[in-house]
Amino acid sequence: MNILVCVKQVPGSNNVEVDPATGVLKRNGIQSKINPYDLYGIETALCLAEQYGGNVDCITMGPPQAKAVINETIAMGASHGAVLSDRKFAGADVLATAYTLSQGIQKFGEYDLIICGKQTTDGDTAQVGAEISEYLSIPNVSNVLSIDEIKDGHIYVTASLDDKNVKMRVSLPCLISVDADINTPRLPSYKIKKNISDNAVEFFSFNDFDDQDEKHYGLAGSATQVERIFPPEKNDNKYSISGTSDEQATAIFELLRTKKMI
Amino acid sequence: MGKLIINKNLVTEEKALSLIKICPFNAITYKDGSLDITSACKMCKMCVKKGQGLVDFIEDDVKEIDKSLWRGVCVYADCSGGKIHKVTLELLGKARELANVIDHPVYAIAIGTNLDECANELLRFGADKVFVYDDPAFADFRIEPYTSAFCDFIDKFKPSSILVGATNLGRQLAPRVAARCRTGLTADCTVLEMKKNTDLVQIRPAFGGNIMAQIITPATRPQFCTVRYKVFTEPTPMDNPTGKIVNMTVTDKMTMSAIDVIKSFAKPKDIDIAEADVIVAVGRGAASDAIRQQAEALANMLGGVVACTRPLVEENIFDAKHQIGLSGRTVKPKLIICLGISGAVQFAAGMKSSDCIVAVNTCNTAPIFDIAHYCVVGDVAEILPKLINKIKGE
């Protein structure tokens, strides 16, 4: 059983703001972390490998510093990791990101199961996993709540589908996206982290891929285009309720009464 | 679509260092007199706008497609289980607005089984044509057959824009279909507009920050977006619809799948914050046990439910079902009282279309006050017990 987990490095905080005067994005801290939703995917993979034998690898796309999140996954128990990094990949939307990852996955190894987290905390799209599966021509199931069994080349999963839960049998290889709360991710081992060997993480750039058409990657390979970015609109139709806490409580109370809420 | 070029002859150390500060993604480096853009670049082009000419954006020749060959604003009708998800109806209302700008028809595509009733309802809610793929093989949602049917429709009818509800089903189906069409997909749009040239303007929170991005799909068709439930408003149904139902042929090849559904079962009934008329929402500034209990008491008094922001779910104070925002639920209650919530854009995107927003926060510059209708700058811990006492005294 070879399992690959797709992970992403995300900003440590979401407090990016636009300076209203200059229109420049303000940076508040530059720390970054592994996307919290990916931890559930890694834990799922590690548990399956423990139960059924096999390897867990991880893959990410990002700047060279994204190696840090791969190291994190190795400290949790993954064997190897790949970082897809190239300026040609910059500015990628969902389509180009998924395509780049699918190219990288095919270079990195052969996998029975690919696991993604539910979504990232910076993009929040929850779309890349499904697009990767399309490029790899394998079935995919999102919102997986539990993995019930792996048997005879099939994986049995329970997934959440809006108003119902569905038990499914899916033939391998396939891609699944796991929901948060599917498990409790383990903590990384400090001991492993200190001793990660240099060849545990492999770097891939555009030149390593089969598809050598630059137009399929990064901004050039993106179908969507950001026309402009702007601060969220403000609501001008607003009232201030000031005074002592007592006066404020009274004002809210009166408001609730006018609105017939009480 | 283009790339960034550094004008090396203009680079001075001073300019380079100020350029590094301009980049919000730390993607510019200056080492040994050489200015470079790294792969951390997100192509926000801030360096082009503010970089004193150091960086230029070179537009590639984009292969123009004939956009007039693509007609119609199409809504994917989420009707798994034979019932239309209400987000579909909201999207039909928006599709009509968008289609009117460019004089296009409104389409709906329905995939499932026993869809007669659904198809008629789609007509009542404004579809000019409802394309139906009805087959027992579509009884359960399985990704490959649904994708095949969807793509069959796109091949044959070439819709210009496709709106998909961001249900669990829609979030799997839309990316899979968009990837097969090699076209763009924008998730969780909060505003949609139509340009005269049929480009769909898609606006959503972006870059994980307090920023909105306006996104278009300039050179491919169809243009795909997903929209959450309760973002747009359900239109009034027509008594005598004039649209037509088109039954589509389902082939064996279309229904092939590597997935077998063993069984499906109803989810245990849970609190659904999206359906509540009144919500008392708590954030980091109201996370103490005492305030939380008071918030619940207030919610009970108002016949509402308690909801929260993402940090409180991450800290295991609340179950994820209570979370409002882009990674939680979108809500549109008659009244939402936000206690100790700063109002990050991810949260705001999930509740800002609420009818009445009351916000209590100690910090008068909190972004929540930008969207609130009633702004209360004060301490939740002091105001909340007094408010509860007043309601009790009623």
Image: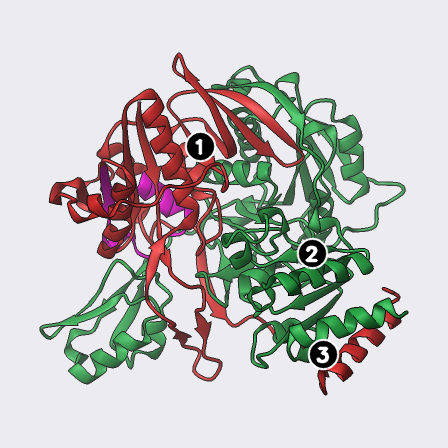
Chain colours: A red, B green
The residue under label 3 is: A238
Q: Farthest residue toward the left?
A: B32
Q: Please report the residue visible at 52 percent of the width from the left and 61 percent of the height from the top.
A: B205
Residue A98 falls inside the magenta stretch: yes
Chain under disc 3: A
Figure quadrant of the N terminus of chain A: top left
Front-lying residue, A166 or B259: A166
Of the residues shown, which amino acid type is indicated by label 1?
Answer: Ile
Task: Please give the label number shown on residue B306.
Answer: 2
Q: Please report the residue visible at 81 percent of the width from the left and 56 percent of the height from the top.
A: B303
Circles 1 and 2 in contact, beta carbons < 8 Å: no
Chain under disc 1: A
Of the residues shown, which amino acid type is indicated by label 3?
Answer: Lys
Figure quadrant of the C terminus of chain A: bottom right
Residue B248 in picture, x, y percent from top left? 65, 25
Residue A139 in picture, x, y percent from top left? 45, 26
Residue A63 lies, with reference to residue B54, above or below; the image says above
Asked where in the image residue A136 lies, by quadrant, the reply is: top left
Residue B40 falls inside the magenta stretch: no
Q: Is residue B249 visible?
A: yes
Q: Depth-wise, is mark 1 or mark 2 nearer the camera?
A: 2
Residue B267 in picture, x, y percent from top left? 67, 32
Task: Please give the label number shown on residue A176.
Answer: 1
Front-lying residue, B272 or B177: B272
Numbered range of the magenta stretch: A80-101
Chain under disc 2: B
